[in-house]
Image (spheres, helix red, strand yellow):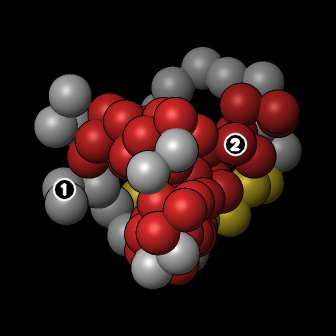
Amino acid sequence: MNHTPGPWQVVGSNVYGNNLRALLPMNAADARLIAAAPDLLAHLEFAVKLLEGISILGATAQVDAMRAVIARARGEA
């Protein structure tokens, strides 16, 4: 994975993480979403692993959609 690891924090409309500042023009809602993205990805990956362990749930369209989102976030799709 090539994203900058968190934690990220929001100060106004700026996003800071790992001694970096995101220089994109954004509103506060976008900044909060970007700051939460690494945690959201990690928790989604964990949820998929849990659901894959339950055979009736691991093969659902929803879990397939979750896998697709993970692949997009990783740049694999």
Residue drawn where x is 57% and y is 60% of the image: 57
**Residue type for callout 1:** Asn
Residue drawn where x is 69% and y is 42% of the image: 33
**Residue type for callout 2:** Leu
Residue at label 1?
A: 2
Along the viewing direction, whichever of 41 and 38 lies nearer the viewer: 41
Residue drawn where x is 45% and y is 79% of the image: 53
Classify residue 51 by image quadrant.
bottom right
- In this picture, residue 62 sits left or right of residue 52: right
- In this picture, residue 44 sits left or right of residue 18: right
Say what secondary structure mark 1 lies in. Answer: loop
Q: Quadrant of the N terminus?
A: bottom left
Q: Is residue 74 visible?
A: yes
Residue at label 2?
A: 33
Using the numbered discs, state the Cα–Cα distance from disc 1 to disc 2 in whole angstroms. Answer: 18 Å
Along the viewing direction, whichever of 57 and 66 lies nearer the viewer: 57
Whole-percent x, y for residue 74 in the image: 26, 46
